[in-house]
Amino acid sequence: MRLHREGNTIMLTTGLVLLALNLLAYYYLFSDNPTTIALLLAASSVLFVLVVQFFRIPNRLLTVSEKQVIAPADGTIVVIEETEESEYFKDRRRQISIFMSPLNVHVNRNPVTGIIRYFRYYPGKYLVAWHPKSSTENERTTVVIQLTNGVEVLLRQIAGAVARRIVWYVKEGQPVEQGSELGFIKFGSRVDVFLPLDAEIKVKIGDRTKGGVTVLAELA
């Protein structure tokens, strides 16, 4: 396991602030109360571990397949439905949505290999990630990847009530490999994937996904 570069500043800042608070408590506030100091140290340690684990990248054997769409994120499947995709395709598509809690790994990965044909970033609101309007009103990105056979897959990073920063590493015209890093969403969020109607869905509501590993669907 390694730690993601997006967490360097946050982890360093958190560590320094907690260290300063504990030194202040030890020397000035609770110098005569070792129980309080021990409790503060324990609470600080737990908080720091929670922050660090958020930026973890576990070692995984990634799934690679031209016919399969792989989960772009860790989380829980909360939506599987046929819906109108109105931004890019402007027609009916299969939508799969993955909710990412603060305890999940938050690296976002490219679900297929291909070329980035479309990219847009939209500032917006911070509705809870499972809100029906979060995919159209929250801060978000839209990424469309075209496979070599011409099939296109749309992925949308969506910020939630806690997540306040979306990071992306792709741009239009860029070739990407399945499983490579697409971006990162800090502290809880959601990812939507829009597929052709003839895609064979391989997951169900409530399934837990592993980014870069779990097969979401097979393309015709």
Image: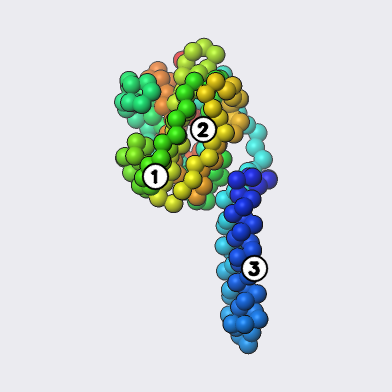
Element at label 2? loop
The quarter of the picture where residue 26 lies is: bottom right
What kind of residue is marked 1? Answer: Ala
| 2 vs 3, front mark | 3
Distance of mark 2 from mark 1, alpha carbons? 17 Å
Element at label 3? helix
Rendering coords of residue 89 (x, y %) = 37, 21
Could you say which is closer to the camera, residue 16 or residue 41?
Answer: 16
Residue name at image x 62 percent, y 55 percent: 11
Kindly identify which residue carries mark 1: 129
- Contact, CB < 8 Å: mark 2 with mark 3? no
Residue name at image x 59 percent, y 21 percent: 175
Q: Earlier in the sequence, mark 2 or mark 1?
A: 2
What kind of residue is marked 2? Answer: Ala
Q: Examine the rendered structure and indicate whether residue 168 appears above or below residue 152.
A: below
For the residue carrying disc 2, how many other residues have a C-alpha within 10 Å: few (<14), some (14-19), or many (20+)?
Answer: many
Residue name at image x 38 percent, y 23 percent: 88
What kind of residue is marked 3? Answer: Leu
Distance of mark 3 from mark 1, alpha carbons? 33 Å
Residue name at image x 57 percent, y 57 percent: 50
- Contact, CB < 8 Å: mark 3 with mark 1? no
Q: Examine the rendered structure and indicate whether residue 66 appears above or below residue 143.
A: above
Identify the mark at residue 71; answer none if there is no mark.
Answer: 2
Element at label 1? loop
Rendering coords of residue 64 (x, y %) = 61, 25
| 2 vs 1, front mark | 1
Whether residue 159 sits left or right of residue 36 in the image: it is left
Rendering coords of residue 54 (x, y %) = 57, 50
The colour scheme of the drawn protein is rainbow
Identify the mark at residue 19; answer none if there is no mark.
Answer: 3
For the residue carrying disc 3, how many other residues have a C-alpha within 10 Å: few (<14), some (14-19), or many (20+)?
Answer: some
